[in-house]
Image (spheres, helix red, strand yellow):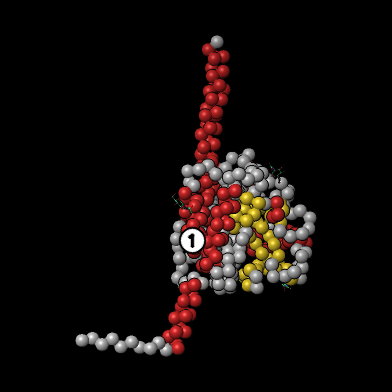
Amino acid sequence: MRINIRRCPSNMDILVSELLLLLGLIGWSYADIQRPDYDDTSDPEFLNPLWMANIPDDQPLSEVTMPGSHNTMALYGGVYAECQSWSLASQLRAGIRFLDIRVRHVNGNLTLHHGVSYQRGHLGHVLEGVSDFLQEYPSETVLMRLKEEFSETYDIYGAVVDYIHRYAHWDLLWHSRLVPSMGEARGKLIILQDFAGPDLGMRYGSLDIADDWKVPTLLHVEEKWLSVHEHLETTLTGNRTQIFLTYSSGAGLFAFPKAVAQRINPQLYEYLRNKTNLNQCFGIICMDFPGAPMIQTIIDFQLRNIESGKRAFNLQFGKSKLKYFTSPLTKERV
Ligand SMILES: *[C@@H]1O[C@H](CO)[C@@H](O)[C@H](O)[C@H]1NC(C)=O
Ligand SMILES: *[C@@H]1O[C@H](CO)[C@@H](O)[C@H](O)[C@H]1NC(C)=O
Ligand SMILES: *[C@@H]1O[C@H](CO)[C@@H](O)[C@H](O)[C@H]1NC(C)=O
């Protein structure tokens, strides 16, 4: 006969189990994860550095579906600060074309920040990185939201101009508020200006933006997904002269960016894969910790449009070529 002696849980056991429960609730995990939709390892599974090369020159940028990274440079500072795990160069080579850059302004210096968390660099590093990338892949364009963070000068224009002259060059920029065509945008950095002052590029506020970033606990992830879903659906009927920008990222006291991304990204990935047969433009989809296959899925919407465009183009081109070649021949025969 077996006697089952149950040990009374000590205070310590209770504390540990409550802690584990809490960590579970906020989605704590240590291991690096690489999934199709989510990746917090240090390198993308595969790269896609020049996917814009195939987009026709006359296509407005507002009709390009492209992947972006939320808080692009937030690689350090622990689970509450980190939103990405790939370097800027890796993100651009993986196919990311929209950057979200936050700078702290102190005495003319613009350091990279996510809230209080210093991100071990300054705006010059970003400008050099983009400049190097565009020099290597001149068929591409990079959009960059730029805003002040963790300082309140409300006057970063002069410092930004100074950094551009020091770390890039004036002609690298798209100097207009208007949405460029793909041809006009190639090789350019398009600043989406989220600060006051004269025009440095496009105004961030001119985009159609959904950024419901507050996700207080993981129980609110479903609500967040619904708002992402809703905005992605409006791209079907929205004003196509505007660039659409949808953030799938979010965070809160009991839901740090990684935990939210681990739960939102699978839904986003499934949603996009459900739509793969449709010729739809979603604008910019801006994420935390996207996986390379997720990025590929977003890029592929673009390529499908081009494929169908190309077929029509080839038909037309085929005809005109025929015309061009037949006339001299006929002349010769005559
Ligand atoms: C600004 O940056 C320069 C060069 O990196 C550095 O020498 C200087 O101390 C910085 N100033 C402030 C106020 O951080
Ligand atoms: C679309 O947006 C542009 C620029 O914001 C505006 O000028 C135009 O009137 C809008 N078109 C429609 C159909 O709403
Ligand atoms: C994807 O499609 C399936 C089958 O139609 C559907 O059950 C599912 O809810 C869709 N997923 C998303 C995220 O839209």
- Left or right? Give the position of 235 relative to 205: left
- Residue 29 image position (x, y, % from top left): 47, 72
- Residue 312 image position (x, y, % from top left): 53, 32
Q: Residue 142: in sight, yes or no? A: no
- Residue 333 image position (x, y, % from top left): 53, 12
Q: Quadrant of the N terminus?
A: bottom left
Q: Residue at x 45, y 87 (%)?
A: 12
Foreground pick, 37 / 219: 219
* Kind of residue at badge 1: Tyr
- Left or right? Give the position of 302 relative to 192: left
Q: Residue at x 52, y 68 (%)?
A: 218
The residue pinned by badge 1 equals: 38
Q: Residue at x 65, y 44 (%)?
A: 239
Which structural element holds mark 1? loop
Q: Is residue 245 above or below residue 332?
A: below
- Residue 193 image position (x, y, % from top left): 71, 56
Q: Residue 225: in sight, yes or no? A: yes
